[in-house]
């Protein structure tokens, strides 16, 4: 880990469970989006459903990933207390990003800088998987295989996916260049 990264509460062992896509996931996102908007108001530029639960038909861990784009994620005076009042707990403090989650561990909220590489990368990956069935199937197959193993932490599980994620991201970047794809929130 680098000095710009703080994992609040330390490492945790969690069972990795990948389940079939649920049409309830977008509904859950909408519910959480309203809570986040109520908490942060005009400080929020965009709130997007990202990650595997945002891709119809893709099996996923039943954790809703939400990306919140703001002017300055490092300004905790505009974030921390407001998110805590909605019941969210700060889990990761990193330069240019914060990650909150629910106490039930079923929602992860990634706060990033608007127009940042972080924001673009996650929206592009989501949109590409929505578009391309071959990469979507390959990603699902890898996740299902990896979920059968016992991982020390969720970060170790995520790391085991990184080679395929790089390959899929390369395909997504080619697609973005050829189609003129731009982040659409």
Image (tube, helix red, strand yellow):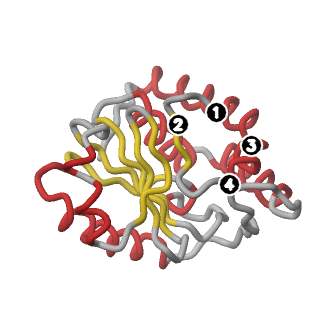
Circle on res. 5: 2
* Residue at (48% x, 79% y) in the render: 24
Dot 3, how many residues are within 10 Å of its Cα: few (below 14), some (14-19), or many (20+)?
some
Quarter containing the N terminus: top right
Dot 1 falls on a residue whose secondary structure is loop
Which residue position is annotated with label 3? 161
Q: Which residue is mark 1?
A: 1
Does 46 appear above or below 28? above
Whole-Å distance between the Cαs marked 2 and 4?
13 Å
Q: Earlier in the sequence, mark 2 or mark 4?
A: 2
Q: Which mark is residue 11?
A: 4
Q: Nearer the viewer, residue 124 or 157?
A: 157
Disc 1 to disc 3, C-alpha distance: 18 Å
Task: Answer with mark 4 or mark 3, whichever residue precedes in sequence.
Answer: 4
Q: Point out the frontmost of discs 1 and 3.
A: 1
Labels 4 and 1: the sequence-earlier one: 1
Residue 6 at x, y percent in the picture: 52, 42
Residue at 67%, 65% (x, y): give it. Answer: 59
Q: Residue furthest left?
A: 42
Sequence-wise first label, 2 or 3: 2
Is 43 on the left-hand or right-hand side of 29?
A: left
Asked if 109 appears above or below 127 in the picture, the reply is below
Count of numbered badges drawn on the protein: 4
Q: Nearer the viewer, mark 4 or mark 3?
A: 4
Look at the numbered discs 2 and 1 and tell me whether their residues touch, using CB distance below 8 Å. yes
110 relative to 81 in the view: left or right: right
Determine the secondary structure under disc 2: strand
């Amino acid at each position: 880990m680098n000095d710009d990264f703080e994992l609040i509460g330390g490492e945790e062992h969690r069972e990795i469970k990948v389940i079939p896509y649920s049409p309830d996931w977008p509904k859950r996102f909408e519910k959480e989006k309203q809570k986040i908007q109520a908490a942060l108001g005009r400080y929020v530029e965009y709130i997007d459903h990202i990650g595997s639960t945002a891709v119809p038909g893709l099996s996923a861990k039943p954790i809703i990933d939400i990306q919140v784009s703001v002017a300055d994620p490092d300004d905790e005076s505009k974030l921390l207390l407001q998110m805590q009042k909605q019941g969210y707990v700060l889990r990761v403090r990193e330069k240019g990003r914060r990650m909150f989650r629910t106490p039930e561990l079923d929602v992860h909220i990634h706060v990033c800088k608007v127009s940042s590489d972080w924001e673009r990368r996650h929206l592009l990956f989501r949109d590409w998987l929505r578009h391309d069935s071959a990469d979507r199937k390959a990603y699902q197959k890898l996740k299902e295989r990896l979920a059968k193993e016992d991982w020390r932490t969720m970060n170790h599980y995520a790391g085991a996916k990184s080679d395929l994620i790089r390959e899929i991201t390369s395909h997504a970047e080619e697609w973005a260049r050829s189609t003129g794809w731009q982040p659409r929130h």
